[in-house]
Image: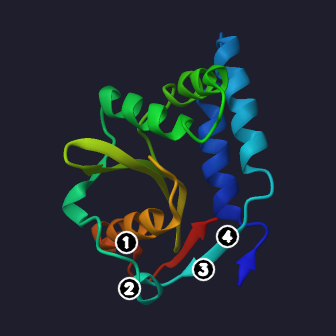
């Protein structure tokens, strides 16, 4: 069952938007935020369980999933995620927007690696007894890779999601 609106998604989106709500934001950051807002309009969410993802391939292990906790990884996250936009100009605006992120709750950024190369992104948001896995993007945007990455992320965050409702942005 898909869900049209989800409070935890609003928390994640406001967290992202606030990173450019500063005294002197760059016009590129603001344009990137607008592109992001357009992209997520109409997103839907699905409550998931680890059992539901057990059918996904084991392309990633939890050891292939890394918390983005310093600027170089933020840039890697931003560049890979920006590939969801077709034009190079839009991709550059997205990189400008996303590289403004500061590492703070309630969200964490993650990268999935294969052979030393970043190939998947995700944002994990936690609020009370809810967890949202969102912004999953992969190098070639294949749904089976996304499912495998989500499965590895669930394994990596098993302690965080215990006794929580887990949602996946679609």
* 158 shown above or below 114: below
Q: Quadrant of residue 7?
A: bottom right
Marks 3 & 4, CB-CB < 8 Å contact? yes
Q: CA distance from mark 3 to mark 4?
A: 7 Å
* The disc label shown at residue 154, or none: 1
Q: CA distance from mark 1 to mark 3?
A: 13 Å
Reading the image, the residue beneath label 3 is: 47
Q: Position of residue 63 (x, y in %)?
A: 19, 60
Camera-nearest residue between 34 and 92: 92
Q: Judge left or right: residue 89 versus residue 100.
A: right
Dot 2, crowdedness within 10 Å: few (<14), some or many (≥20)?
few
> What label does residue 54 carry, if any?
2
Residue at figure coordinates x 47%, y 87% from the top left:
52
Provide the residue designation for mark 4: 45
> Along the polypeptide, which appears first: circle 2 or circle 3?
3
The residue under the point 42% across, 63% down is: 145
């Amino acid at each position: 069952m898909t869900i049209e609106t989800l409070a935890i998604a609003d928390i994640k989106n406001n967290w992202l938007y606030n990173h450019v709500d500063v005294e002197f934001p760059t016009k590129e950051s603001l344009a990137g935020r607008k592109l992001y807002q357009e992209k997520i309009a109409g997103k839907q969410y699905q409550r998931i369980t680890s059992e539901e993802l057990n059918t996904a391939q084991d392309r990633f292990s939890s050891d292939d999933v890394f918390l983005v906790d310093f600027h170089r990884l933020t840039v890697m996250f931003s560049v890979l995620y920006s590939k969801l936009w077709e034009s190079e100009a839009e991709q550059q605006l997205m990189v400008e927007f996303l590289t403004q992120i500061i590492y703070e709750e309630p969200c964490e950024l993650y990268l999935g690696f294969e052979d030393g190369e970043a190939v998947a992104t995700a944002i994990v948001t936690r609020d009370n007894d809810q967890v949202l896995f969102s912004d999953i993007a992969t190098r070639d945007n294949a749904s089976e890779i996304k499912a495998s990455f989500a499965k590895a992320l669930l394994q990596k965050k098993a302690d965080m999601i215990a006794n929580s409702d887990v949602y996946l942005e679609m």
